[in-house]
């Protein structure tokens, strides 16, 4: 096999591979001899079919198999011999006609085109100086959380007299439009905390001041954007009977609150809250110092040659997200007034940054022998499987059969391990700030790898029709 490098421009390489006819003939002869003992043909004893007859009957098929095996093996050998690390899947262009190879004894030739990984020196992690913002868990933070837990754990007791904002009412109701009851508009024994916003606007307000036994015709208008189209914008009357009024009891922040939440006492509850907040703070601190680290790595390696195909693939993925955001009116406000060319320019820079950082982190990790263990991958697969209750086995089998899916799990694990490695060696100084500053968005533009084409979706709107346990509304 003869291999010649035809072109080398930047990171692009093209190799011409020629397999002499004599080598192919030797492979064909060897293959025929290998299968000959197994060949069964009418008129011949088992294993005694002449080689020439096998060649005549099956030569084309056998040669086809040889060539199919030869191309990927020759491609890999070419890369291995030259110690080439491909940045993209090599493209193979067969130049020969297999029929000529078999019938005319022609050489077999093909070309391999690919992009190689750039060679570059990475910054020494020990020279990096980073600031990591940290925040202590304040007593006020724990107190606020306890107050919120107390509100959530409130219990209600029967109340004599009129219902006030914050009271719970137990009601029966039947809704009608133009005198006709509609499906999903009735319930018995529904519980409603006045002022909670659980029902459509105006419903709860009209029950303030009602007493047990009162009957109230609650008149409301369904919102124009209401989920059930046949009710949207319609005026409705809910014939409502108040069965009971309940007032919220005072929930004490003491051991009894902790016990209701499954903990032994108030101190145990406070400790649990502190640990939760410490974990949240640690995650936020890591995100900010990681962003700073990536900015430093990007700036330090801005001259690295980037494989064009990798950049293009990354850009195409990002651009699909941008187009989807445009179609659904979810584009970031800062991007809404930009032309398509301006958007493409901006997001191509993001694609370039992502590829650059991926190459830098991979190179640092390679030199440091960072790897992802099978145990770590198995743990990640199990975590994914747990997200699909009842289908765990199906999810595990999916990852077992799809190397690409496993790679998608491996990549972020590898990245985090490389980041950990760098942070261990870098000069990292903790800077104490308060919680608000720790969780505040940075004033400057977000790191390119974190910029999203679509703005965050607004929270789903509440279902505004009166809910109840006894019946479901149309959109439920």
Image (cartoon, rainbow, N blue to C red):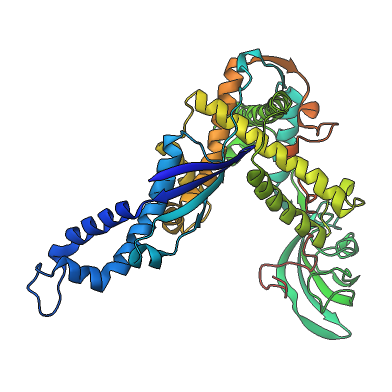
Which residue occupies the extreme left position in the image? 45
**Which corner quadrant of the image does residue 321 belong to?**
bottom right
Q: Position of residue 231 (x, y in %)?
A: 83, 77
* Residue 205 visible somewhere in the drawing: yes
Q: Identify which residue, 240 or 274, lies in the foreground.
A: 274
424 on left or right of 38: right
Instruction: In the rendered view, tell whether residue 185 sits above or below residue 13.
Output: below
122 on left or right of 368: right
For the point 58% across and 37% down, the residue is 259
Count of all numbered marks drawn on residues in the image:
0
Instruction: In the rendered view, tell whether residue 452 sits above or below residue 121.
Output: below
Q: Identify which residue, 278 or 422, lies in the foreground.
A: 422
Q: Position of residue 152 (x, y in %)?
A: 71, 45
* Residue 378 visible somewhere in the drawing: no
Which residue occupies the extreme right position in the image? 337
Q: Identify which residue, 339 or 454, lies in the foreground.
A: 339
Q: Position of residue 13 (x, y in %)?
A: 57, 42
Q: Position of residue 373 (x, y in %)?
A: 43, 35
58 on left or right of 70: left
**Which corner quadrant of the image does residue 459 belong to?**
bottom right
Instruction: In the rendered view, tell whether residue 254 sits above or below residue 104.
Output: above
446 on left or right of 310: right
Question: Which quadrant: the C terminus?
Answer: bottom right
For the point 15% across and 76% down, the residue is 41
For the point 65% across and 13% down, the residue is 127
Q: Identify which residue, 231 or 73, lies in the foreground.
A: 73
Instruction: In the rendered view, tell whether residue 211 sits above or below residue 429.
Output: below
């Amino acid at each position: 096999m003869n291999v010649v490098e035809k072109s080398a421009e930047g990171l692009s390489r093209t190799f011409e591979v020629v397999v002499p006819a004599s080598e192919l003939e030797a492979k064909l002869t060897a293959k025929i001899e290998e299968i000959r003992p197994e060949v069964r043909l009418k008129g011949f004893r088992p294993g005694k079919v002449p080689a020439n007859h096998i060649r005549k009957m099956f030569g084309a098929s056998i040669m086809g198999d040889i060539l199919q095996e030869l191309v990927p093996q020759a491609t890999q050998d070419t890369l291995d011999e030259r110690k080439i690390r491909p940045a993209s899947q090599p493209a193979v262009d067969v130049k020969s006609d297999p029929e000529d190879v078999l019938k005319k004894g022609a050489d077999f030739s093909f070309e391999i085109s690919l992009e190689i990984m750039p060679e570059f020196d990475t910054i020494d992690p020990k020279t990096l100086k980073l600031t990591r913002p940290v925040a202590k868990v304040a007593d006020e933070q724990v107190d606020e959380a306890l107050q919120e837990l107390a509100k959530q754990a409130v219990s209600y007791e029967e109340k004599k007299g009129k219902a006030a904002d914050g009271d719970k009412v137990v009601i029966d109701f039947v809704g009608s439009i133009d005198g006709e009851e509609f499906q999903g508009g009735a319930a018995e024994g529904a519980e409603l905390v006045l002022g909670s916003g659980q029902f459509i606007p105006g419903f709860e307000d009209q029950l303030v001041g009602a007493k047990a036994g009162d009957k109230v015709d609650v008149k409301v208008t369904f919102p124009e954007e209401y989920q059930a189209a046949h009710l949207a914008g319609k005026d409705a009357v809910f014939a409502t009977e108040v069965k009971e009024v309940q007032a919220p009891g005072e929930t004490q922040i003491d051991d009894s609150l902790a016990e209701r939440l499954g903990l032994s006492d108030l101190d145990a509850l406070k400790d649990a809250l502190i640990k939760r907040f410490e974990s949240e703070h640690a995650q936020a601190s890591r995100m900010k110092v990681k962003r700073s680290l990536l900015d430093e790595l990007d700036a330090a390696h801005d001259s690295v040659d980037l494989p064009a195909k990798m950049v293009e693939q990354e850009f195409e993925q990002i651009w699909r997200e941008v187009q989807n955001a445009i179609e659904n009116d979810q584009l970031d406000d800062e991007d809404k007034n930009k032309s398509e060319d301006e958007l493409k320019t901006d997001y191509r820079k993001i694609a370039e940054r992502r590829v650059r950082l991926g190459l830098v982190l991979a190179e640092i990790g390679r030199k440091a022998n960072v790897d992802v263990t099978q145990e770590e991958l198995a743990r990640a697969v199990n975590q994914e499987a747990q997200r699909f209750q009842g289908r765990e086995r199906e999810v595990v089998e999916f990852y077992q059969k799809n190397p690409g899916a496993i790679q998608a799990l491996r990549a972020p694990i590898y990245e985090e391990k490389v980041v950990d490695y760098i942070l261990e060696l870098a000069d990292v100084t903790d800077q104490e700030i308060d919680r608000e500053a720790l969780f505040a968005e940075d004033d400057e533009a977000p790191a390119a790898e974190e910029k999203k084409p679509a703005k965050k979706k607004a929270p789903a709107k509440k279902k505004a029709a009166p809910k109840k346990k006894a019946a479901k509304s149309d959109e439920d």
